[in-house]
Amino acid sequence: MKYPDTEPEIMALARQVIEGLKQLGAELPAPPVPLDDLQARVGRADDTIAAVVVATTTLRERHTDKDEAITDVVDGTKANLRYAEVVFRDQPQKLTQFGW
């Protein structure tokens, strides 16, 4: 049997091992990682996985907020540049003050 590669498969196997230790604990009196310790490790992994999901969701939301803010900056800058182009159409040196 090959040890699983993906997180969901690893967590599922760990849970199966926990169940096996519960059911066969009398026959395995001294496992290298005791049942309580393995359960704590799985719980810690579950907590960190949940935290990553929350952080990833938050990051996506902040990224969307950033994109919208940049779009607002672009729209405002373009509008002002178009206005300046009309007002200063015969005075290109003034447009350079706008970086244009």
Image (cartoon, rainbow, N blue to C red):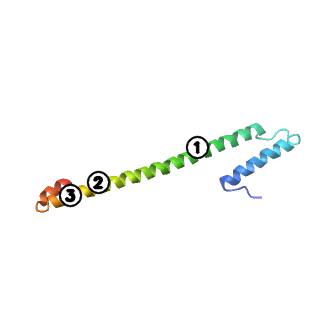
Secondary-structure class at tag 2: helix
Packing grade of label 1 (10 A; few <14, some 14-19, many >=20) is: few
Q: What residue type is labelled 1?
A: Ala
The quadrant of the image that shows the C terminus is bottom left
Q: Mark 2 points at which residue?
A: 76
Instruction: Please report the residue visible at 15 percent of the width from the left and 58 percent of the height from the top.
Output: 87
Along the horizontal axis of the image, is 77 left or right of 24?
left
Front one among 57 and 21 = 57
- Tag 1 near tag 3, CB within 8 Å: no
Q: In which quarter of the image is residue 75?
A: bottom left
Identity of the residue drawn at 74% across and 58% down: 2
Q: How far apart are marks 1 and 3 (CA)?
A: 48 Å
Residue type at mark 3 is: Tyr
Residue drawn at (61%, 45%) of the image:
50
Furthest residue in direction left, as rendered = 90
The x, y position of residue 40, in whole percent, is 70, 38
List the single residue furthest toward the top: 36
Q: Which amino acid does label 2 sit on?
A: Gly
Please, which residue is most extreme toward the bottom here?
Answer: 90
| Residue of label 1 | 51
Q: Name the residue under label 3.
A: 83
Q: Is residue 19 left or right of 60 when viewed as pictured? A: right
Which residue is at 53% across, 49% downward? 57
The tally of labels here is 3
Image height of 32 relative to 84, above or below: above
Residue 65 image position (x, y, % from top left) = 42, 50
> Is residue 100 among the parts visible in the rendering?
no
Front-lying residue, 7 or 64? 64
